[in-house]
Image (tube, rainbow, N blue to C red):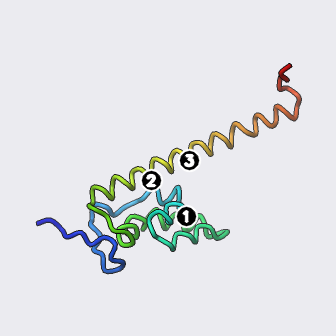
Amino acid sequence: MEMQNTSGQGAASVVPDEIKGWNWGAFLLNWIWSIGNKTWIGLLALVPYAGLIMAIILGVKGSEWAWQNRKWESVEQFRKVQKIWAYWGLGVFIVSLLAGIIVPVILRGMAAGHMVQPY
């Protein structure tokens, strides 16, 4: 017997077991993900010192809250959308990490005068 889709019904929503678990998109893109998934408590990630804690909470509870706070066509559609959030989160993380490594190297080179100046 197929479970009825109760997404978007707030606390009354029955969260399917197959969507429970860690949500990388919610963890990595926390406040942005929160807006996109109508999970307003996630905006606490913008509060200094609370951001990392809220990101972890969103990673743990994000899928359940997103199911409760938005109407989804199906579990499959929900999983597909959350996978896209995870890929974007990973992409932003990688770009940020590379920028954090490359930009200081470039700036250090410029400060030391080692950069070749174009004519």
Q: Which residue is mark 2?
A: 85
- Which quadrant would the N terminus be assigned to in this image? bottom left
> Residue 49: x and y, percent?
66, 69
Q: Which mark is residue 31?
A: 1
**Between disc 1 and disc 2, whose residue precedes?**
1
Q: Which residue is mark 3?
A: 92
- Contact between marks 2 and 3 (CB within 8 A): the answer is no
Query: In the shown orientation, is residue 21 left or right of residue 30?
Result: left
At a point 24% along the width and 69% down the height, the residue shown is 5
Camera-nearest residue between 40 and 49: 40
In the rendered view, tell whether residue 64 sits above or below residue 89: below
Q: Residues within 10 Å of mark 2 (few under 14, many from 20)?
A: many
Outermost bottom residue: 12
In the rendered view, tell whether residue 81 sits above or below residue 69: above
- Contact between marks 3 and 1 (CB within 8 A): the answer is no
> Residue 106: x and y, percent?
77, 34
Q: Amino acid at mark 2?
A: Trp
**Between disc 3 and disc 1, whose residue precedes?**
1
Instruction: Give the alpha-carbon distance from disc 3 to disc 1, as whole Å.
Output: 14 Å
Q: Amino acid at mark 3?
A: Val
Instruction: Give the alpha-carbon distance from disc 1 to disc 2, as whole Å.
Output: 12 Å
Q: Amino acid at mark 1?
A: Trp
At a point 64% along the width and 70% down the height, the residue shown is 47
At a point 28% along the width and 62% down the height, the residue shown is 73
**In which quarter of the view is residue 74 placed?**
bottom left
Number of dots carrying numbers: 3
> Residue 6: x and y, percent?
26, 72
**In which quarter of the view is residue 107 placed?**
top right
Q: Residues within 10 Å of mark 3 (few under 14, many from 20)?
A: some
